[in-house]
Amino acid sequence: MTQSLLTLPVAGMSCAACAARIEKQLNRMDGVEAAVSFANESAQLRYDPDQTKPQQLVDAIVRCGFDVPRQTLELGIGGMSCAACAARLEKALGRLPGVEASVNFAAESARVDFLPGLTDRDRVLDAVRKAGFEPSLREDGGGEAEAAARYRRELAWFAASALLTLPFMVEMAAMFAGGHHGWLPRMWQLALATPVQFIVGWRFYRGAWQALRGGVANMDVLVALGTSMAWLLSAAVTLLGLEDQHVYFEASAAVITLVLLGKLLEARAKGKTSAAIAALVKLAPKTARVERDGELVEVAVDKLQRGDLVVVRHGDSLPVDGEVVDGQAWLDESMLTGESRPVAKQAGDKVYAATRNQDGMLKVRATGVGGDTQLAEIVRMVAAAQGSKAPIQRLADSISAIFVPAVSAVALLTFVLTGWLYGDWAQALIHAVAVLVIACPCALGLATPTAVMVGVGNGARRGILFRNAAALEQAGKVDVLLVDKTGTLTEGRPTLRHALALDGDENRLIQLAASAEAGSEHPLAHALLQRAKESALPLLACERFRADVGNGVEAALPGVGTVKVGVPSWIGLALPPEAAAWPLEGNTVVAVSLDDRPLGLLALADPLRGSSKGAVAALRGLGVKVVMLTGDHESTARSIAAEAGIEEWRAGMKPQDKADVVKYWQQRGSKVAMLGDGVNDAPALAAADVSLAMGAGSDVAIAAADITLMHGDLAHAVDAIRLSRASLAKIRQNLAFAFVYNVLGIPLAAAGMLNPVIAGAAMAASSVSVVSNSLLLRRWR
């Protein structure tokens, strides 16, 4: 029996017992010997490849409740000429064990997720080269320098081709103007056209060979086949001295030159689709002023470490994420939130890299540097979203896979029928060449990804982060939006309005409640802690803390007892007459108990955001029904809903209740979105067709969301839906243009109504038009 060796990383083990459980599960499999190390967080495996596949080993570890972390490789890909190239490379990478790949033709990039142990970086790079492309490792920033270098190369090749083709263009212009035709001797034409065909045009032969070797056909096949036919016919006529026959050197040379012109313009336009990432990267400063040994030292940003004290003066951009330890300032955080108004910062506040100090001075202790900042995470998120595929692209991918073979068949049929019907086989060949040239599928391949790249980038500039292209597409189809109340419709900064102590000691009631809530991140907890601070009430030590999601919190205070703070029904306390009006005034009422003995009631008010009412009206105008879900008392929910203009709402909702409401609307055929910001919203966010989370919300909510709104405002949800609809409209326009172009162009070329040169110009113009149409999205506001 031949055994293979494999080492897999394992994440999520908390103790040696976890390792033993995984090892036991793996050793039950046929032909497997496993040794799992908790200390090294890895599994050493010997297995019989005839009995067990590597993916089965991975699946076994996952079934035990642990994770086998994947690594991600961002690559720039050189040499792709159309969508068929991207599909071929994606297929080649998908054959590697443990690899999931997404190739973006528009961005000339690939995102490769692989399992260490099954595949490594070198195998991925080698697979790209074997497929006929040139890989390059791409850092955060979208390969801006790489794109600029590629543009300069394209410009040089086009200039050389244009210079050699210019005499043909002069002769064609003279002919169309009624002047002398044939002033350029045929041997000179051969001398000029040959380097264009085989030196400048070598890329098309190389690309065609690699594609055919991989079992597919791409744009290079069409260009190489069409121009070669025109050149070979012309060369034969010239060398055999057949003066009565036409030559078509101008067609082969001009088509190659026009294709290169199209590629040049396309490269320039595609560079603009990635401008959002480049702009984000440029926001971060290159140096920072760091306090060391009592002196200020200017240090390169890549040399900073966590814990460094960074001084940020007026006009500076922050180089790190951190916490203010001294000073006061107003920061422009628009690059993160899309909110143009500056935000006041003082000691204890969190600040973020690339935000700009508009007024004041701060001393900041670094908590995130380099790739660990929120800016770096946004760049990674935007790059991943721009490189992902929208569901609507599947149609274009399916057509591209069969497009070139189908066009080749049409060109052959055109050649045979035209030659047979008219007896002019030379002209029949030129008709076939025109069919091959005009049918390039570039526009089809660029239609979706360019619009996705611009749409995602536009959202990032305005504080709307789409997790992937599917989220960008689906958000525009939403017709029901479920929204949480606290921190979503409301400010999320409640204040304590009323306190009712059953024993008359309101300060003790507030002190116990604040001490119990000290371990909670809920906005209501912050309000209690703020009131305790303002009233100089010291917090009592907490030994144990437990959150009962949807009900409240329970904390053990040594020497005092067990304190509960939560909804009155959970505490077992009915509202007395003096507190009956509190919910009607829009207050959230919580009860407090000590050792299950009710102590009193607290009323906290969280005012409606100033923009919420207008946002609800805007959503209604977009045809989106807004439903408010809250765990609050019915009276409070009714008051907030009425103020916001929301007709349908549900109160007293627990996390699973919110998820059930999502399913209720889905079963009625609606496309449902959920907007929330807390842990209690996570089940509903996961169940929704599209999930939106506030950027200031909990990590759990953000992790479950398809779209993150960096500025906590319902108005940004409106913007996300509008941007999605605008992007989807551009995609549909692009696809329609690409389809109509080919539906009209191919029959005209087959009928002999398009000269190959005109066909080449039209082909180049189609790709540029699609990208330019996508770039119009940058004007979206």
Image (spheres, rainbow, N blue to C red):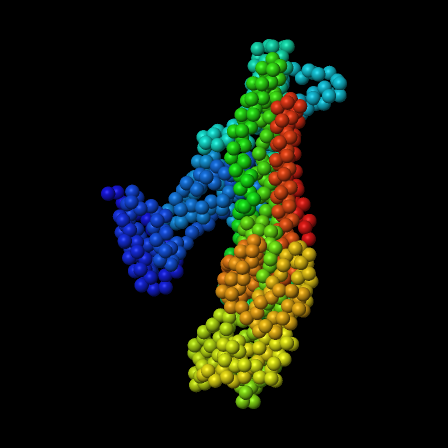
Q: Using the rendered view, name the quadrant where residue 326 is placed.
A: bottom right
Q: Residue at x 60, y 54 (%)?
A: 478
Residue 607 placement, left or right of 385: right
Can residue 225 be seen in this snapshot? yes
Task: Give the image location of residue 581, x and y in percent.
Answer: 63, 80
Q: Nearer the viewer, residue 187 or 630?
A: 630
Task: Give the image location of residue 294, x and y in percent.
Answer: 55, 70
Compared to 301, does 132 lie above or below? above
Q: Number of numbered discs present?
A: 0
Residue 585 placement, left or right of 468: right
Can residue 324 be seen in this snapshot? no
Q: Residue at x 61, y 32 (%)?
A: 742
Task: Give the image location of residue 460, x and y in percent.
Answer: 60, 54
Compared to 106, does 534 lie above or below? below
The residue most toward the front is: 668
Q: Nearer the viewer, residue 326 or 704?
A: 704
Q: Residue at x 56, y 44 (%)?
A: 392
The residue most toward the bottom is: 504
